[in-house]
Image (cartoon, helix red, strand yellow):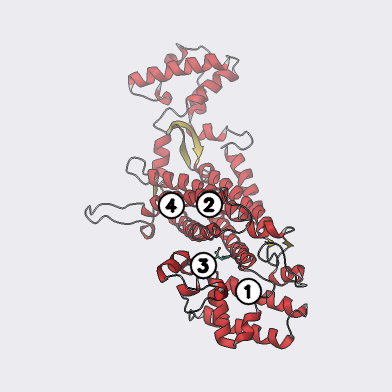
Amino acid sequence: MTKLWGGRFQKSAEAWVDEFGASIGFDQQLVMEDLEGSIAHVTMLGAQEILPVEDVAMILDGLKQLQVKAEAGELEFTVANEDIHLNLEKMLIDLIGPVGGKLHTGRSRNDQVATDMHLFLKKRVAEVIGLIENFQKTLLIQAEQHVETIAPGYTHLQRAQPISFAHHLMAYFWMLERDKQRYQESMKRIDILPLGAGAMAGTTFPIDRLKSAELLGFANVYANSMDAVSDRDFIVEFLSNSSLLIAHLSRFAEEIILWSTDEFKFIELDDAFSTGSSIMPQKKNPDMAELIRGKSGRVFGNLMGLLTVLKGTPLTYNKDMQEDKEGMFDTVHTVLGALKIFDGMVATMTINTKRLHAAVHSDFSNATELADYLATKGMPFREAHEVTGKLVFTCIQRGIYLLDLPLEDMKVESELIEADIYEVLAPEAAVRRRNSLGGTGFEQIKIQLEKAKACLF
Ligand code: ARG
């Protein structure tokens, strides 16, 4: 089989060498984008009278036929034609004859492949943003139902202070909000068209790059043809934004896993998002959450992979850059899947409010209340901390909690403590009174939920 670039060659590479160099195994995922790019390119060539109208009509007709076949999954790609660009060009020529060979006028695979990647990411990033929003809505719905559900809040994974369970869920809402913003802001840089840069120096044909940009719906074109074919920043940025997103999902996954244990039992995952064990009949495993936690590894890896590919490459295009694709496809696939699964998992999980209630009533997470109480009465906070610590110690020795400690025993440490301390120590009061901006107090949560809605609707 002769190569589309075979003129200069005296002999062909062996099949196994071609196999190593080929990208068709994975870049066939760009089939729709490649055809879209070609349609715009040849339309522009026609408008500029670089190609005669009848040639343009034939090429457009051929490309549209290929689109139909691609949608039906009827295209058969071959390693002998190396990549998606040469495969499609060969198919076009087979379909409409030698006139198909005019499509590549004023274009190189270097600006072509970069164009495909920009088109591809534009669509996928929009999808990611949509799924983040769906997940945020789910979090908001769950949070609204659990404003008054008191739960233990942790630092160092030790009981710290009581919180509204809604507050905990909403912490993830805001992480996702920043993730979404990062993707949205990155769109500005994805929305730049490389087409027309040629191999790297531009072209001698009187092309109209702005026309191509308009046809493909790009806001901008690269100002420098060398930069246009060398730039993979927009992919690195996508992989980086995705790394942060999956890091957030992974932390949340870890909490879902902990909360599902018998030790915590704060939530129960729906059967639809859990799996059983092949040997232990009693088991219900949070596999989906574990898998998302685990998949963070490949997403971080894809980021490191591409940075490493790029770091020593001289300008402009180098075959190294073919390695930009699999990591990007993999990250797109992973992130879209993880968001969908997580959304479903959180929407269907049961929150064990009784268990959460019992948890905060059997710990010392109200100790800060006592210290704050004393500080409010004028005792320096450092001293109040010491006094409270001593009372906690007394309780531990007696096997009771602060609310069970009689007033006279409290007064041993400070005369400032009065009977009203018991209302202050109630976990519900501890939450209610944390009314500082962004705090867990019920009033603040309501303000927070309003702010969150404003981000979505
Ligand atoms: N398959 C190639 C890639 O993905 C397309 C660009 C090839 N360009 C070239 N000059 N060999 O990077």
The x, y position of residue 132, in whole percent, is 56, 56
Q: With 57 as the anchor, is 253 left or right in this view?
A: left
Q: Identify whether 98 is placed above or below 387.
A: below
Task: Determine crowd level at label 4: few under 14, some 14-19, many 20+ residues with C-alpha closer than 10 A.
Answer: many
Alpha-carbon distance for marks 1 and 4?
Answer: 32 Å
Give SS at disc 3. Answer: helix
The residue nearer to you, when weighing 219 against 82, is 82
Alpha-carbon distance for marks 3 and 2?
Answer: 17 Å
Residue linked to disc 4: 295
The type of residue carrying mark 3 is Asp
Discs 1/2, front: 2
Give SS at disc 1. Answer: helix
Q: Residue at 64% x, 60% y: name it.
A: 229
Give SS at disc 4. Answer: helix
Verify CB contact (< 8 Å) between mark 3 and mark 2.
no
The type of residue carrying mark 4 is Lys
Alpha-carbon distance for marks 2 and 4?
Answer: 21 Å
Residue linked to disc 2: 309
Residue linked to disc 3: 27
The x, y position of residue 359, in whole percent, is 40, 36
Question: Quick one: label 3 or label 2, which is nearer the N terminus?
Answer: 3
Task: Determine crowd level at label 1: few under 14, some 14-19, many 20+ residues with C-alpha closer than 10 A.
Answer: some
